Every structure is written in structure tokens, then in C-alpha cells.
Image (spheres, grey):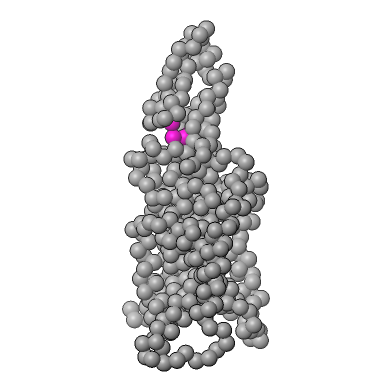
Amino acid sequence: MKNLFRSSNLRTLSFLMAIVLALPLSWKGLTGFHTWLSPFIMLNSVIAVKSFVWLNIVAFPVLLFVFFRKRWFCLNLCPAGWCFDRISALNKDKTYTYKRLPDIGKWLAIISLASAIIGLPLFLVFDPLAIFNGFFTILSGGMNIFAIISLSGFLLLLTIHFFYPGVWCAKLCPLGGLQLVINDLTTRLKLFFNKQKPLPHGIDPGRRYFLMSGIGLIAGITIPKFLKPPAEIIIRPPATVAPPLLYSLCCRCGNCIKACPTGIIKYSTDFTGIPAWMTPEISYESGYCLETCNLCGQVCPTGAITLFNFRAKGQLFMGIAKVQLENCLLFNNIECVKCKESCKYKAIAFVAKENILNMVPMIDKDRCVGCGACEVICPTDCIHIAGVIIN
């Protein structure tokens, strides 16, 4: 039992568990659970959305350990780091050095947290757990080549580590950078309370962090002005935050895609909306949004899809149904009631039209949430869900 809790064994167990939970195997609320362990994701999310969900609490023990043990998460739990170490070990060349390479991970961490104060965390997509979990979304199927390439960042990092062992963990990772920043702060606090002067080592870290924070604040203020939404309104999962916050808050981890029981959540790969690239969108080809489901909100670690109660879905508008009457069976004097029977929100009523024997479907825009049930069941494909602007 004592050997089980050695850092190497603990990280191996963490890696195996992360692999299992990252696979699209209907884990429901546990899908991609390791993304909740990241203090970098948690802090960016809580600061940006100004709210806290109960699963955020699992990152707090990690944060606490980091205060007392340098890079504790990296050494004990990080599944991506476990993979990078194995690949790095294959390179027998020991002449590499990173002394001249700046601590990019620290810059990414501080700038992202500072911009999150303005409501626009910039670098969540570089969290190693988001990259790790996103890669396994490829196994969900139904993806185009552009989505697959976009999710191959994990393979790219593995390749980089073969040629430059340890470079991501040592200098580039924002999660590792955050832990190093915390270690710097705790070291300075210890020196302060022990009334010791810090040893001279070049640039004052405090000034450097002040500069990083200033860049993050300025970026958080200016960048939203350049983030234009796609020309076409994208249908999003229920309770998705509005752009441009969505573009930066979504870490592209794929948890919502893997957890969706009907498989209707996909990655957006529309070239006309680059800021929205790889954010979740709805496609009704394989089903509709179940009225009893809120898994996408449960598994989203950043709050890009707000946690919601499925009983409130009648007020969460994703889109609205549009009927092409000329293709409707009722319009052509053929009996059909499938759309009305499928609607759980009572948003479809039959009304009389001149010169038509049967009554035809009419959509109540105040009741229709765009769940897609009517589109999926319509035998003549005359109903389609149109996107709505999220305020």
C-alpha cells in the first residue's frame, strides 16, 4: 500500500484512469473528469464567469498541495506529463538545455488569469488536460479531417518531446507555469516572514508578474473588439454562454461531445468563423436534444456550457423550428401528426389555412426551444431548426 502512493505509481494510476474516462464510453457526468482537476482551468473559469459549481472543488486540494510541494500536480497526477516523460526517455541525447528559453508557461498562466478578470481567459486551450481529453474525442467518430487535425495537438506535443525531451513541461505548459508562479510566491512569503532578503537573480519576479498581468488586462479589453461572430448563426447546446466569451472560455476538451447521449454535439469547423473554431455546435443528423438530459452542462469544466437543471430546458432557447409548408403532408391533404406528438414543449399547434383540407402546423416561438425532435421525426424533411442569437 505504501508503494502505491509513490509519485510514479500514483501518476501511472492517474494516467490509466484519465485514459478510461477520456474515451467516449458513456461515462455520463464522469466524462473527462481529469479536466476538473486542473487549477489552471478552474481559476480561469471561476474568475471569468464569476460563479462556482460544485465540481470546481476537486481542483482545490490540488492547489493546496501545490502550495507546499513544487509542481505537485505535474509529478503526481498529470496524465499528459506521464506520456511526455515516456517519450522523452526514448531520446538518449542529454546535451539539450532550456536555460535560454523563457518561461513561456508562466507568461501564458498569468496573462490568461489577468485577462479572465475582464471576462476573456485567453489560453485555456493550452491546458494539457484539455489537449489530452480533446484528442480522444476523435474516437467519437463523425468528424471531418479538419477537426481531426485540430485535435492532434497531443500527438504534436509527443513528437516535440521526442526531439526536445521535457520542453513542454519545463517551459511551455501554462498549468506547470501556474504551479511555478505559486512556488515563487510561497518562496517570497517564506523569506518575508523569516525576514530574509531574496537572493539577487536578475529581473525581479514581482515586476515580471506585474508586466504579465498588465498585458493580460490590456488583451482582455482589446481582443473582444476584433472577435467577430460567424456570418451564420450557429446552433449551440443549451445554456451555452454568448460570444465572444464562448470563444475563449471553451477549452475544446470534447467532454460535451463524448457525454451527449444522442451524439448531436459536434465541433464547429466553419472557416468563416475562425474565433469559433472547434467550439460545440448542434447537428440534428443523429437525434435531438433530450428533454431529460443536462450532461453537456455537467461535464463542461470551464462554464462555457453553464450547468443547468433539465427541468429548466423550456427556457433555454437553442433555436426555433421553421416549417416549409409546401412539403408538409398536411398541406398536401395527407394525414400526419408526428411533429406535434414529438414536441415535449407544446410548441406546435395545428391551425386552419384557406383552401387546405387539413390544418397545418404552426410554431409557437415563445415555446419552441429548438430541441430538434420535430425535425428528426418529420417524414418529408419539411421542418428545420434555425439558430437564434444568444443575448
Would residue 22 be found to the left or right of residue 344 on screen? right
Q: Which residue: 44% across, 43% down? A: 238
Of the 4 image quadrants, the one containing the N terminus is bottom left
Q: Which residue: 52% across, 81% down? A: 205
Indicate the position of residue 191 as horizontal and vertical percent values.
41, 88
In this orientation, which residue lies closer to the viewer: 147 or 12? 147
Q: Report the magenta residues as a range.
A: 368-372
Indicate the position of residue 366 as horizontal and vertical percent values.
42, 30
The image shows residue 358, relative to residue 114, as above or below, that is above
In this orientation, which residue lies closer to the viewer: 38 or 82? 38
- Number of marks in picture: 0
- Which image quadrant for residue 32? bottom left
The image shows residue 372, relative to residue 173, as above or below, that is above
Q: Is residue 92 magenta?
A: no
Indicate the position of residue 3 as horizontal and vertical percent values.
37, 81
Q: Which residue: 40% across, 25% down? A: 341
Query: Would residue 271 be seen by someone viewing this image from the given angle?
Result: yes
Indicate the position of residue 69 as horizontal and vertical percent values.
41, 81
Would residue 356 be found to the left or right of residue 58 on screen? right
Query: Would residue 288 be seen by someone viewing this image from the given angle?
Result: no
- Magenta: main secondary structure equals loop
Q: Which residue: 45% across, 50% down? A: 305
Would residue 9 be found to the left or right of residue 354 on screen? left
- Which image quadrant for residue 58? bottom left
Q: Is residue 369 magenta?
A: yes
